[in-house]
Image (cartoon, rainbow, N blue to C red):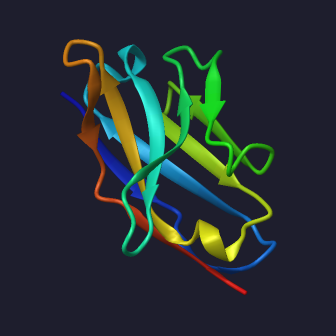
């Protein structure tokens, strides 16, 4: 079991940057692959980025490659999403999630943090 709390969202102009943080509670942070997802108004939630347990492997949605970077700090039980060159289409609620290999899916989700990019 893990609880996730996101922070770092806000309002930024196009071309700007934000760094999202997701702090996990519980003792088993290192066993989880972690991911970031987002949901824009009127759209389905979509995958943004993921990082393996040890942080050696990452993957990104095509729409954010080269602009976003996911990382994790096991000592702080935190996963980050550095977002650069933001575009208005990046506007969404961003969610952090932990992948449960027992369940075979992202079983644990944070409450989300709003990111708004103005043109």
Instruction: Tell me the residue at 52%/68% (across/down).
Output: 9
Quadrant where the image shows the N terminus: top left
Q: Position of residue 97 (x, y in %)?
A: 36, 39
Residue 48 position within the rendered picture, expressed as x and y whole percent measured from the top left = 55, 45
Query: Residue 34, can we see it?
Result: yes
Q: In this view, does 25 lie to the left or right of 51?
A: left
Q: How many marks?
A: 0
Q: Please say if 38 is above or below 87.
A: above
Q: Which residue is drawn at 77% across and 59% down?
A: 84
Q: Hey, which residue is sitting farthest front in the picture?
A: 43
Question: Residue 33: image x %, image y %?
Answer: 43, 22
Residue 58 located left or right of residue 3: right
Q: Foreground residue, 76 or 30?
A: 30
Quadrant where the C terminus sits is bottom right
Q: Quadrant location of residue 14?
A: bottom right
Residue 77 visible from this viewpoint: no
The foreground one among 98 and 42 is 42
Residue at 45% from the left image edge and 56% from the top image edge: 38
102 horizontally vs 16: left or right: left
């Amino acid at each position: 079991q893990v609880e996730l709390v996101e922070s770092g969202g806000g309002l930024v102009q196009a071309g700007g940057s934000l760094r999202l943080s997701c702090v996990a509670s519980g003792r088993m942070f290192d066993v989880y692959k972690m991911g970031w997802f987002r949901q824009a108004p009127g759209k389905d939630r979509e995958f943004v980025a993921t990082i393996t347990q040890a942080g050696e492997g990452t993957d990104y949605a095509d729409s954010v490659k080269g602009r976003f970077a996911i990382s994790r700090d096991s000592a702080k039980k935190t996963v980050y999403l550095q977002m650069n060159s933001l575009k208005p289409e990046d506007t969404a609620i961003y969610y952090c999630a932990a992948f449960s290999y027992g369940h075979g899916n992202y079983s644990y989700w944070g409450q989300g943090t709003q990111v708004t990019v103005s043109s």
